[in-house]
Image (tube, rainbow, N blue to C red):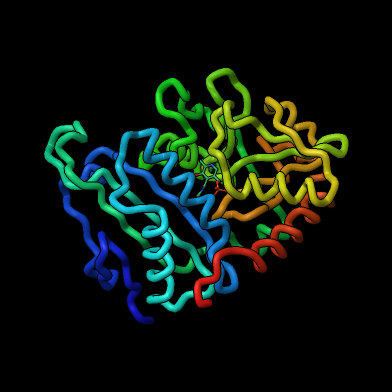
Amino acid sequence: MKPLQIYIDGSFYPEGEAKVSVFDHGLLYGDGIFEGIRIYNGRVFRLQEHLERLWDSAKAICLTIPMTLPEMEAALLETIRRNGLHDGYIRLVVTRGVGNLGLSPDRCPKASVIIIAATIQLYPKEKYEVGMEMVTCSTRRCSPAALSPAVKSLNYLNNIMAKIEANHAGADEGVMLNEEGYVAECTGDNLFILRGGEVLTPPISSGALRGITRRVVFEICAELGIPIREANLTRYDIYTADECFLTGTAAEVIAAIRLDTRPIGDGKPGKMTNKIIARFREVAGSTGTPIYP
Ligand code: PXG
């Protein structure tokens, strides 16, 4: 296989030579931000929304992205073209840049931009048919008073600690609660339940990321006439839900069928969930920014 061509600060490098400095504060302190973006069928899915979220993350952490949004869009499309991809996954990273061994970003004169366009390892196909097993993690989602979970930062240790718990329990995903005990989200996905014909998902203020796939689900429900709203959820609400599903750029829309060994509904992917998954695939496969116009 041909090596991937990686974009770093305006130049392209074969993957073996695509390297950053050991003095980059992204490495030293997790100081930076990122986006994970999908390519379906020669189009970038929800590109503007991802770029706007990146700019919001940057603003929240006082990081100046060293290019304009249209320049970033052009660099991203060029990276995909250089790698000849029609379906795949883009990791867009902006680090604080090279500084010294002190945490102050004042010593980092310029942020670094990295764009990796690659293919993605999906969950096994079977998971989309049988659904995901979840456990509740004892690691709580970061308090917004400490670091807003709305910032898609390079510091994912909070989520990784929870993911380790899920792995140790033999589960596919971990449910993260906020400090009050309400459901925030999963380690890398937003969570939805269906109850009495209505779709419910935790509000962003509960500690959830402003997920772009989450937003697509709101649009799909509006289109299909399925009532949907934000609500504070507890584990009890998931245990007693009719259906449950997760959303994320990597996971797409996927059913969750068990929490803490209790089956959700009848323990199989729900009817409404399958309807939303089918519509999501149609939307994802037919909309987006053309890469090869
Ligand atoms: N919550 C968290 C904490 C996330 O990291 C989502 C929700 C879903 O958001 P989007 O906008 O993608 O619908 C995410 C995003 C991975 C991986 O490697 C996970 C995400 C993105 C990219 C890669 O598991 N999750």
Could you say where residue 288 lies in the image, as x and y percent from the top left?
A: 59, 63
Could you say where residue 117 lies in the image, as x and y percent from the top left?
A: 41, 66
Q: Quadrant of residue 157?
A: top left
Q: Quadrant of residue 198?
A: top right
Q: Is residue 281 placed above or below 249 in the rendered structure?
A: below
- Residue at image point 83% right, 51% down: 224
Return the residue found at the far left: 100
Q: Nearer the viewer, residue 183 or 144?
A: 144
Could you say where residue 144 lies in the image, as x and y percent from the top left?
A: 47, 24
Q: Nearer the viewer, residue 180 or 292?
A: 292
- Residue at image point 26% right, 64% down: 10
Q: Nearer the viewer, residue 284 or 67?
A: 67
Q: Is residue 175 placed above or below 39 in the rendered structure?
A: above
- Residue at image point 18% right, 41% down: 108
As drawn, is 245 to the left or to the right of 92? right
Return the residue found at the far right: 196
Q: Nearer the viewer, residue 237 or 37?
A: 37
Q: Is residue 20 placed above or below 169 in the rendered structure?
A: below
Q: Quadrant of residue 191?
A: top right
As drawn, is 225 to the left or to the right of 41? right
- Residue at image point 43% right, 46% down: 54
Quarter occupied by the N terminus? bottom left
